[in-house]
Amino acid sequence: MSERKRRVFERELKLSAVARVMAGEGVAAVAGELGVPAGLLYKWHLCFRRSGPNGLRCAGRPQGCWPAGEPEPAQPAELQELAAARKRLAELERKIGQQQVELDFFRQALRQVGGTRRPSDGPGVPASTRSSRR
């Protein structure tokens, strides 16, 4: 059995590759140029989208651990804005769903009320409901 050595990719390479993909370059083109399997680049992109730069860990290190002396990278303002926008979008979609349920309820109630009312054919014809006064 032949032993295959694992290739180790530096975090900077991962970050630059993901940045290029997010900028609109094709995954296959970036992967081919860097000599990285496209599936691995997709994985990096997914990890970056989930956890930001913290998702792209150094080789041999657990998620979120950084070498001594190196500060942990902060979330870029663009990612924070994107997360806030996605949260707001989810809130608005939830509110639209609630409003749609209420609208459907009131439409059904209006149909039922409209079906039970007796039509008035003109002046002098008794009203659809009796007067409350006796």
Image (cartoon, helix red, strand yellow):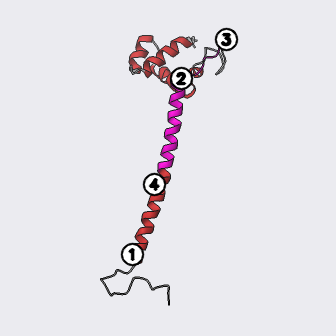
When asked about the image quadrant of residue 4, the answer is top right
Badge 1 local density, few (<14 within 10 Å), some, or many (20+)? few
Check contact, mark 2 vs mark 4: CB within 8 A. Answer: no
Check contact, mark 1 vs mark 3: CB within 8 A. Answer: no
What amino acid does circle 2 point to? Ala
Identify which residue is drawn at 48% across, 24% down. 42
Where's residue 55, x and y in %? 58, 22
On screen, residue 126 versus residue 61, left or right, reads left
Residues at marks 4 and 3, CA–CA distance in whole angstroms: 52 Å
When asked about the image quadrant of residue 106, the answer is bottom left
Residues at marks 3 and 2, CA–CA distance in whole angstroms: 24 Å
- What is the secondary structure assignment of the residue under circle 3? loop
Where's residue 99, x and y in %? 47, 54
Disc assigned to residue 67: 3
Does the rendering let one see residue 43?
A: no
Residues at marks 2 and 4, CA–CA distance in whole angstroms: 34 Å
Residues at marks 2 and 1, CA–CA distance in whole angstroms: 57 Å
Q: Which of 17 and 81 is in front in this view?
A: 81
Disc assigned to residue 115: 1
Dominant secondary structure, magenta: helix
Please tell me how many numbered marks the rendered image carries: 4
Relative to residue 81, is residue 112 depicted above or below? below
Query: Which mark is first along the chain, 4 or 2?
Result: 2
- The magenta segment: 70-96
Check contact, mark 1 vs mark 4: CB within 8 A. Answer: no
- What is the secondary structure assignment of the residue under circle 2? helix
Does the rendering let one see residue 22?
A: yes
Relative to residue 132, is residue 75 depicted above or below? above
Badge 3 local density, few (<14 within 10 Å), some, or many (20+)? few
Q: Mark 2 points at which residue?
A: 77
What amino acid does circle 1 point to? Gly
